[in-house]
Amino acid sequence: MKIYSLITLLFTSFLFAQTETMTHEVYFETDKFEVPPTEHYRLLLFLSEIETLDIQKVSIYGFTDDRGSDSYNLVLSQNRANSIKTIFSNNEFDESIITNVDGKGEILLKLVKEEDIHKIRGLNRKVEIIVQPYNPPRVQKALEEKPKVEDIIKGELKAGDKFTLDNILFKTGYSKLLPESKPVLENLAEALLERKDIYFTIQGHVCCTQNSRDAIDRKTKKRNLSVARAKFIYDYLAKKGVSTRRMKYVGMRRKFPLGGDPKFDRRVEILVTYVGESQGN
Protein backbone atom coordinates (compact mmCIF):
# COMPACT_ATOMS: atom_id res chain seq x y z
CA MET A 1 0.00 0.00 0.00
CA LYS A 2 2.83 2.37 0.81
CA ILE A 3 4.41 1.86 -2.62
CA TYR A 4 1.04 2.40 -4.34
CA SER A 5 0.44 5.57 -2.33
CA LEU A 6 3.91 6.86 -3.19
CA ILE A 7 3.35 6.23 -6.93
CA THR A 8 -0.03 7.97 -6.75
CA LEU A 9 1.52 10.95 -4.98
CA LEU A 10 4.34 11.22 -7.50
CA PHE A 11 1.94 11.00 -10.44
CA THR A 12 -0.34 13.64 -8.91
CA SER A 13 2.65 15.89 -8.28
CA PHE A 14 3.77 15.42 -11.88
CA LEU A 15 0.35 16.43 -13.22
CA PHE A 16 0.28 19.47 -10.96
CA ALA A 17 3.76 20.49 -12.08
CA GLN A 18 2.62 20.30 -15.69
CA THR A 19 -0.25 22.70 -15.03
CA GLU A 20 1.41 25.30 -12.80
CA THR A 21 1.88 28.85 -14.00
CA MET A 22 5.00 29.09 -16.16
CA THR A 23 7.07 32.22 -16.73
CA HIS A 24 9.79 33.27 -19.12
CA GLU A 25 11.75 36.49 -19.46
CA VAL A 26 13.24 37.97 -22.62
CA TYR A 27 15.98 40.59 -22.26
CA PHE A 28 16.69 43.54 -24.58
CA GLU A 29 19.51 45.90 -25.47
CA THR A 30 19.32 49.55 -24.37
CA ASP A 31 16.61 51.50 -26.24
CA LYS A 32 15.84 48.46 -28.46
CA PHE A 33 12.71 46.39 -28.88
CA GLU A 34 14.05 43.92 -31.46
CA VAL A 35 14.65 40.55 -29.80
CA PRO A 36 18.37 39.64 -29.77
CA PRO A 37 19.24 36.32 -31.50
CA THR A 38 20.17 34.51 -28.28
CA GLU A 39 16.96 35.62 -26.60
CA HIS A 40 14.97 34.63 -29.67
CA TYR A 41 16.43 31.12 -29.47
CA ARG A 42 15.60 30.90 -25.76
CA LEU A 43 12.05 32.00 -26.48
CA LEU A 44 11.58 29.31 -29.13
CA LEU A 45 12.73 26.71 -26.61
CA PHE A 46 10.14 28.02 -24.18
CA LEU A 47 7.43 27.83 -26.85
CA SER A 48 8.39 24.20 -27.46
CA GLU A 49 7.91 23.52 -23.75
CA ILE A 50 4.40 24.99 -23.55
CA GLU A 51 3.01 23.81 -26.91
CA THR A 52 1.70 20.56 -25.44
CA LEU A 53 -0.11 22.27 -22.54
CA ASP A 54 -3.80 23.10 -22.47
CA ILE A 55 -3.31 26.84 -21.96
CA GLN A 56 -5.98 29.07 -20.50
CA LYS A 57 -4.25 32.41 -21.02
CA VAL A 58 -0.93 34.09 -21.72
CA SER A 59 0.09 37.54 -20.47
CA ILE A 60 2.97 39.52 -21.98
CA TYR A 61 4.35 42.51 -20.06
CA GLY A 62 7.10 44.82 -21.30
CA PHE A 63 9.49 46.79 -19.08
CA THR A 64 12.40 49.23 -19.34
CA ASP A 65 15.16 50.41 -17.04
CA ASP A 66 14.94 53.70 -15.11
CA ARG A 67 16.44 55.91 -17.82
CA GLY A 68 14.29 57.90 -20.23
CA SER A 69 11.09 59.85 -19.66
CA ASP A 70 7.90 58.15 -18.52
CA SER A 71 6.26 58.58 -21.92
CA TYR A 72 9.32 57.23 -23.76
CA ASN A 73 9.55 54.21 -21.46
CA LEU A 74 5.86 53.40 -21.84
CA VAL A 75 6.16 53.37 -25.64
CA LEU A 76 9.38 51.34 -25.58
CA SER A 77 7.99 48.77 -23.15
CA GLN A 78 4.84 48.40 -25.25
CA ASN A 79 6.93 47.88 -28.38
CA ARG A 80 8.90 45.18 -26.58
CA ALA A 81 5.71 43.41 -25.56
CA ASN A 82 4.37 43.68 -29.12
CA SER A 83 7.56 42.17 -30.56
CA ILE A 84 7.12 39.10 -28.36
CA LYS A 85 3.49 38.71 -29.42
CA THR A 86 4.63 38.84 -33.05
CA ILE A 87 7.06 35.97 -32.45
CA PHE A 88 4.24 33.95 -30.88
CA SER A 89 2.13 34.59 -33.97
CA ASN A 90 4.92 33.85 -36.45
CA ASN A 91 5.38 30.47 -34.77
CA GLU A 92 1.72 29.41 -34.98
CA PHE A 93 0.77 30.15 -31.41
CA ASP A 94 -2.95 30.71 -30.81
CA GLU A 95 -3.33 34.48 -30.34
CA SER A 96 -6.83 34.17 -28.90
CA ILE A 97 -5.42 33.06 -25.53
CA ILE A 98 -2.99 36.00 -25.31
CA THR A 99 -5.11 38.15 -23.02
CA ASN A 100 -2.64 40.90 -22.13
CA VAL A 101 0.08 42.60 -24.15
CA ASP A 102 1.01 45.62 -22.05
CA GLY A 103 3.93 48.00 -21.71
CA LYS A 104 4.48 48.77 -18.02
CA GLY A 105 7.29 51.30 -18.40
CA GLU A 106 10.26 51.29 -16.07
CA ILE A 107 11.13 49.01 -13.16
CA LEU A 108 12.52 50.78 -10.11
CA LEU A 109 16.18 50.04 -9.41
CA LYS A 110 15.57 48.92 -5.84
CA LEU A 111 13.32 46.04 -6.94
CA VAL A 112 16.28 43.95 -8.15
CA LYS A 113 18.68 42.30 -5.69
CA GLU A 114 21.96 43.34 -7.29
CA GLU A 115 24.65 45.92 -6.50
CA ASP A 116 25.96 46.65 -10.02
CA ILE A 117 23.68 49.31 -11.51
CA HIS A 118 24.53 48.21 -15.08
CA LYS A 119 23.46 44.64 -14.32
CA ILE A 120 20.29 45.92 -12.65
CA ARG A 121 19.34 47.93 -15.72
CA GLY A 122 20.10 44.97 -17.97
CA LEU A 123 17.74 42.79 -15.92
CA ASN A 124 15.04 45.46 -16.09
CA ARG A 125 15.09 45.76 -19.91
CA LYS A 126 12.81 42.80 -20.42
CA VAL A 127 9.49 41.27 -21.32
CA GLU A 128 7.88 38.91 -18.86
CA ILE A 129 5.68 36.12 -20.23
CA ILE A 130 3.21 34.43 -17.87
CA VAL A 131 1.51 31.24 -19.05
CA GLN A 132 -1.50 29.92 -17.13
CA PRO A 133 -2.57 26.38 -18.13
CA TYR A 134 -5.94 24.91 -17.23
CA ASN A 135 -5.69 22.97 -13.99
CA PRO A 136 -6.71 20.25 -14.49
CA PRO A 137 -6.48 20.18 -18.32
CA ARG A 138 -9.81 20.17 -20.12
CA VAL A 139 -11.21 16.95 -21.51
CA GLN A 140 -10.78 16.86 -25.28
CA LYS A 141 -13.95 16.39 -27.31
CA ALA A 142 -14.17 13.28 -29.47
CA LEU A 143 -13.68 14.01 -33.16
CA GLU A 144 -16.51 13.40 -35.57
CA GLU A 145 -15.94 10.27 -37.63
CA LYS A 146 -15.07 11.20 -41.23
CA PRO A 147 -14.56 9.14 -44.39
CA LYS A 148 -11.06 7.75 -44.81
CA VAL A 149 -8.92 9.42 -47.44
CA GLU A 150 -8.53 6.22 -49.43
CA ASP A 151 -12.33 5.82 -49.58
CA ILE A 152 -12.71 9.40 -50.84
CA ILE A 153 -10.18 8.80 -53.61
CA LYS A 154 -11.88 5.56 -54.66
CA GLY A 155 -15.26 7.30 -54.85
CA GLU A 156 -16.71 9.69 -57.43
CA LEU A 157 -14.61 12.79 -57.88
CA LYS A 158 -14.73 15.79 -60.20
CA ALA A 159 -12.63 18.87 -60.81
CA GLY A 160 -13.09 21.36 -57.98
CA ASP A 161 -13.63 18.77 -55.25
CA LYS A 162 -11.52 19.39 -52.17
CA PHE A 163 -10.88 17.29 -49.09
CA THR A 164 -8.74 17.67 -46.01
CA LEU A 165 -6.17 15.04 -45.16
CA ASP A 166 -7.55 14.40 -41.68
CA ASN A 167 -5.07 13.16 -39.09
CA ILE A 168 -2.18 14.50 -41.13
CA LEU A 169 -1.04 16.92 -38.45
CA PHE A 170 2.19 18.88 -38.25
CA LYS A 171 4.40 19.82 -35.37
CA THR A 172 3.94 23.48 -34.49
CA GLY A 173 6.32 25.63 -36.52
CA TYR A 174 7.59 22.76 -38.69
CA SER A 175 6.77 20.90 -41.89
CA LYS A 176 7.51 17.68 -40.02
CA LEU A 177 4.54 15.36 -39.51
CA LEU A 178 3.51 14.08 -36.12
CA PRO A 179 4.11 10.30 -35.85
CA GLU A 180 0.41 9.43 -35.81
CA SER A 181 0.05 10.97 -39.28
CA LYS A 182 2.31 8.50 -41.11
CA PRO A 183 -0.28 5.70 -41.64
CA VAL A 184 -2.74 8.17 -43.23
CA LEU A 185 -0.07 9.37 -45.64
CA GLU A 186 0.83 5.80 -46.58
CA ASN A 187 -2.84 5.03 -47.32
CA LEU A 188 -3.07 8.20 -49.44
CA ALA A 189 -0.08 7.15 -51.56
CA GLU A 190 -1.46 3.64 -52.09
CA ALA A 191 -4.87 4.97 -53.14
CA LEU A 192 -3.35 7.46 -55.61
CA LEU A 193 -1.17 4.75 -57.13
CA GLU A 194 -4.26 2.62 -57.75
CA ARG A 195 -6.32 5.44 -59.21
CA LYS A 196 -4.25 7.10 -61.89
CA ASP A 197 -6.85 9.41 -63.48
CA ILE A 198 -6.80 12.07 -60.75
CA TYR A 199 -4.77 15.27 -61.09
CA PHE A 200 -4.59 17.52 -58.05
CA THR A 201 -3.01 20.39 -56.15
CA ILE A 202 -1.71 19.93 -52.63
CA GLN A 203 -2.56 22.98 -50.51
CA GLY A 204 -0.64 23.68 -47.31
CA HIS A 205 -2.05 25.82 -44.48
CA VAL A 206 -0.81 27.36 -41.24
CA CYS A 207 -2.56 28.63 -38.14
CA CYS A 208 -2.53 31.64 -35.91
CA THR A 209 -0.39 34.14 -37.86
CA GLN A 210 -1.39 37.79 -38.06
CA ASN A 211 -3.81 38.47 -40.90
CA SER A 212 -3.12 36.11 -43.83
CA ARG A 213 0.67 35.95 -43.49
CA ASP A 214 2.60 32.72 -43.75
CA ALA A 215 4.33 31.37 -40.66
CA ILE A 216 8.07 30.93 -40.18
CA ASP A 217 9.55 27.48 -40.67
CA ARG A 218 11.68 27.05 -37.57
CA LYS A 219 14.02 24.66 -39.38
CA THR A 220 14.87 26.93 -42.32
CA LYS A 221 13.96 30.30 -40.69
CA LYS A 222 12.02 31.18 -43.87
CA ARG A 223 8.47 32.55 -43.89
CA ASN A 224 7.10 29.82 -46.13
CA LEU A 225 5.78 27.18 -43.76
CA SER A 226 2.53 26.52 -45.63
CA VAL A 227 4.51 25.89 -48.84
CA ALA A 228 6.95 23.64 -46.97
CA ARG A 229 4.07 21.55 -45.62
CA ALA A 230 2.55 21.11 -49.06
CA LYS A 231 5.95 20.23 -50.54
CA PHE A 232 6.54 17.65 -47.81
CA ILE A 233 3.42 15.77 -48.97
CA TYR A 234 4.36 16.28 -52.64
CA ASP A 235 7.85 14.86 -52.11
CA TYR A 236 6.52 11.91 -50.14
CA LEU A 237 3.99 10.98 -52.83
CA ALA A 238 6.61 11.37 -55.57
CA LYS A 239 8.97 9.10 -53.63
CA LYS A 240 6.20 6.50 -53.40
CA GLY A 241 5.78 6.56 -57.18
CA VAL A 242 2.95 9.04 -57.83
CA SER A 243 3.78 10.91 -61.05
CA THR A 244 4.78 14.54 -60.56
CA ARG A 245 2.81 15.31 -63.76
CA ARG A 246 -0.34 14.72 -61.76
CA MET A 247 0.62 16.92 -58.83
CA LYS A 248 1.24 20.54 -57.93
CA TYR A 249 1.74 22.09 -54.51
CA VAL A 250 1.00 25.56 -53.16
CA GLY A 251 1.09 27.39 -49.82
CA MET A 252 -2.20 28.98 -48.76
CA ARG A 253 -0.69 30.82 -45.77
CA ARG A 254 -3.46 31.62 -43.28
CA LYS A 255 -6.12 32.62 -45.79
CA PHE A 256 -8.68 30.02 -44.75
CA PRO A 257 -8.71 29.34 -40.98
CA LEU A 258 -11.22 26.70 -39.90
CA GLY A 259 -11.89 28.06 -36.44
CA GLY A 260 -11.77 25.90 -33.34
CA ASP A 261 -8.59 24.17 -32.25
CA PRO A 262 -5.60 25.81 -34.01
CA LYS A 263 -3.90 22.45 -34.62
CA PHE A 264 -6.49 21.70 -37.32
CA ASP A 265 -5.39 24.80 -39.27
CA ARG A 266 -1.92 23.25 -39.53
CA ARG A 267 -3.28 21.12 -42.31
CA VAL A 268 -2.99 19.95 -45.90
CA GLU A 269 -5.87 19.75 -48.38
CA ILE A 270 -6.18 18.10 -51.78
CA LEU A 271 -7.88 20.08 -54.56
CA VAL A 272 -8.89 17.92 -57.52
CA THR A 273 -8.02 19.80 -60.73
CA TYR A 274 -8.84 17.17 -63.33
CA VAL A 275 -10.34 13.69 -63.53
CA GLY A 276 -9.78 12.02 -66.86
CA GLU A 277 -7.93 9.40 -68.76
CA SER A 278 -5.14 7.59 -67.00
CA GLN A 279 -1.62 8.57 -68.08
CA GLY A 280 0.65 6.46 -65.89
CA ASN A 281 1.23 6.77 -62.17
Image: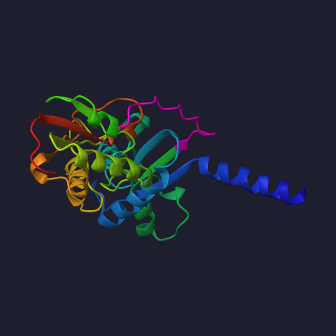
Query: Hey, which residue is sitting farthest bottom in the picture?
Result: 116
- Residue plotted at (23% across, 28% down): 156
Q: How many marks?
A: 0
- Residue plotted at (40% across, 51% down): 183
Vertical order, 22 against 167 (above or below): below
Whether residue 133 appears in this view of the structure is: yes
* Magenta span includes 238: no
Asked if residue 38 lies left or right of residue 54, the reply is left
Q: Position of residue 195 (x, y in %)?
A: 22, 42
Asked if residue 262 lies left or right of residue 257, the reply is right
Report the magenta residues as a range.
Answer: 132-148
* Magenta span includes 134: yes
Locate residue 71: give its quadrant.
Answer: top left
Q: How is the image coloured?
A: rainbow
Q: Which of these two is toward me, 180 or 135? A: 180
Q: Position of residue 93 (x, y in %)?
A: 37, 44
Q: Which of these two is toward me, 250 or 274? A: 274
Q: Which of these two is toward me, 203 or 192? A: 192
- Residue plotted at (48% across, 58% down): 109
